[in-house]
Image: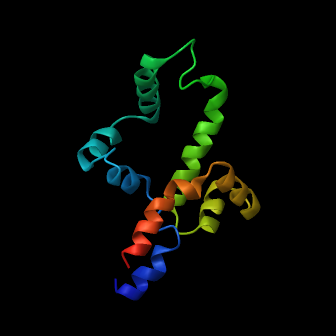
Amino acid sequence: MNLENKKRSAGRNQYYSISNKLRKNGKSSEEFEIIFNNLSLEEVIGLKLELASKSAFNGKLYGVPLWYSIPTIVKDAVLKYALSATRSKREAARFLGLNELAMKKNINRYKIDSYFEKEVDKEDESK
């Protein structure tokens, strides 16, 4: 693939990668991701909760009632994934079954752009 086609196929979301962000922050590695990939989503969530529960207080992890926070946590994660797996916000909206206005509201509500912001800024500076 030549450079022109590569640029065209990359899209605006090319720097929206959870894996790259975690690796750059020293929170992940290729080896960790290989092991992690062998776990089911339920195992990942259960393990994360078990590890976090060591600091639990009155059944509230991180100071929030977990049961009522699950929809928000899941939507935040799925939104980040959709943006990292697609080439544009419009494509991510279609992937999630949202219209563009709903997508924009959710990106703002969950502060998705600021989550990936540092990665985009670093890539822009290196050009």
Q: Position of residue 74 (x, y in %)?
A: 58, 39
Residue at the spot x=44%, y=58% of the render?
Answer: 17
Q: Is residue 95 left or right of residue 21?
A: right
Query: Looking at the picture, does residue 84 appear above or below residue 9?
Result: above
Q: The N terminus lies in which quarter of the figure?
A: bottom left
The residue at the far top in this view is: 58
The residue at the far left in this view is: 31
The residue at the far front in this view is: 125
Q: Position of residue 27 (x, y in %)?
A: 34, 44
Q: Position of residue 69 (x, y in %)?
A: 64, 30
Residue at the spot x=38%, y=49% of the render?
Answer: 22
Nearest the viewer among 41 and 116 is 116
Name the colour scheme. rainbow
Task: Locate residue 7: give its quadrant.
Answer: bottom left
Q: Is residue 125 left or right of residue 13?
A: left
Nearest the viewer among 28 and 8 is 28
Residue at the spot x=67%, y=26% of the render?
Answer: 68
Q: Is residue 39 left or right of residue 64?
A: left
Q: The C terminus lies in which quarter of the figure?
A: bottom left
Residue at the spot x=59%, y=45% of the render?
Answer: 76
Query: Looking at the picture, does residue 4 appear above or below residue 91?
Result: below
- Numbered label tally: 0
